[in-house]
Image (cartoon, rainbow, N blue to C red):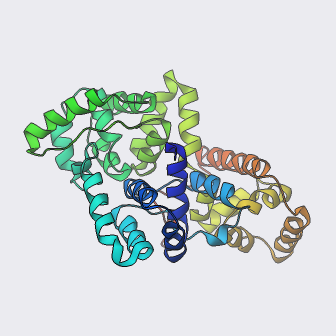
Amino acid sequence: MSDDGLRKAAVLLMSLEEDDAAKLLAKLPNKAVEKVSIAIAQMETVTSREQERVIAEFLESKPSVLATNSGGLERAKALVKKALGKDATDMISVLQQALESLPFGFLHKADPQNILSFIVDEHPQTVALVLSHIPSSTAASVLQGLPMARQLAVIRRIAQMGQTSPEAIDEIERALEVRMSLVMNQSFEKAGGVESVAEILNVSDRATERQILESLAKDTPELVEEIRRLMFVFEDISKLADKDIQSILKNVETAQWAMALKGASQALQDKVLRNMSSRAAEMLKEEMEYLGKVRLSDVESVQQKIVDIVRNLEENGQLARPTGDTEEEYVS
């Protein structure tokens, strides 16, 4: 199985209910179970955009089967136990050992402040490599502790990073090994890229995000555009407050909603419909039914147009995009 196929399999299993995922996993050969389980354990979360693409390849857009996009070691262990039953012990042991040998695996659960204290004076390329190998929430906290100039230098290097040689990883690991008294094995893996930047900035505080993107825009506006597109996806509209949904409704035509919501979760559909008048909601439902089956590429194109509208409204101060996974709370 290719690396791309392995990741898709992991994303699919992470997207299903645990029992359904375990049934699928149980049908795979033991070697495949091991590889997919390790892939799941390495991914704490996946973006909703990637999840939608993988699911769309598996079946024709059926959001009701989606349960969660969380991964991690515990999720992987739970699936292996359900899939293999009494034979799971050896596989879990192999899984644990494989994860321990990953680059910077010892940092995955480390306190961000501790990590920062060890790498704050390192070259930006070194910091970029480390941040690309740890969970995005941890990386965001470390990034926030760096001076602004170094934040920009690190972000640029993460965005431009592709395949990293085992020698480079090994050299940095050895330096950290001396100071942190830990031993680990090297591994060749792809890290960094624009998606990593988007994930880190998504969980950074808004001030840090704005400063970095505004500074990057001066030299590389096309990079900022790409990062922004990955930072906020169509499904994230469900996290907005009702008053912000209503602002979007004023700027999006019913025909656009009908197409875009064909590929949306039930939660997002419900949120949009309940912010419309009864008559408008009925008209939208009728138009969605009238459309019938539509091409995924057409749906995604319209969804992106609506996302661009959301971003423009935010930039003009007409709505506030919340940070995190829940809706922004308001008090009177």
Residue 284 in sight here: yes
- Name the residue rendered at 34%, 67% in the picture: 74
Which residue is found at the position 37% from the left and 58% from the top? Answer: 41
- The image quarter containing residue 86 is bottom left
Quarter-wise, where is residue 40 in the image?
bottom left
| Residue displayed at 16% across by 41% down | 117
Q: Residue 189 location, x and y as percent?
A: 38, 38
Q: Residue at x 39, y 42 (%)?
A: 208
| Quadrant of the rendered image containing residue 294 | bottom right
- Is residue 215 or residue 31 the one in the foreground? 31
The answer to whether residue 297 is above or below residue 40 is: above
x and y percent of residue 127 in the render?
28, 34
Q: Residue furthest top?
A: 219
69 is higher (above) or lower (below) than 221: below
Q: Is residue 321 visible?
A: no
Q: Residue furthest right?
A: 290
Q: Nearer the viewer, residue 199 or 147?
A: 199
The x and y percentages for residue 219 are 50, 21
Q: Nearer the viewer, residue 96 or 283?
A: 96
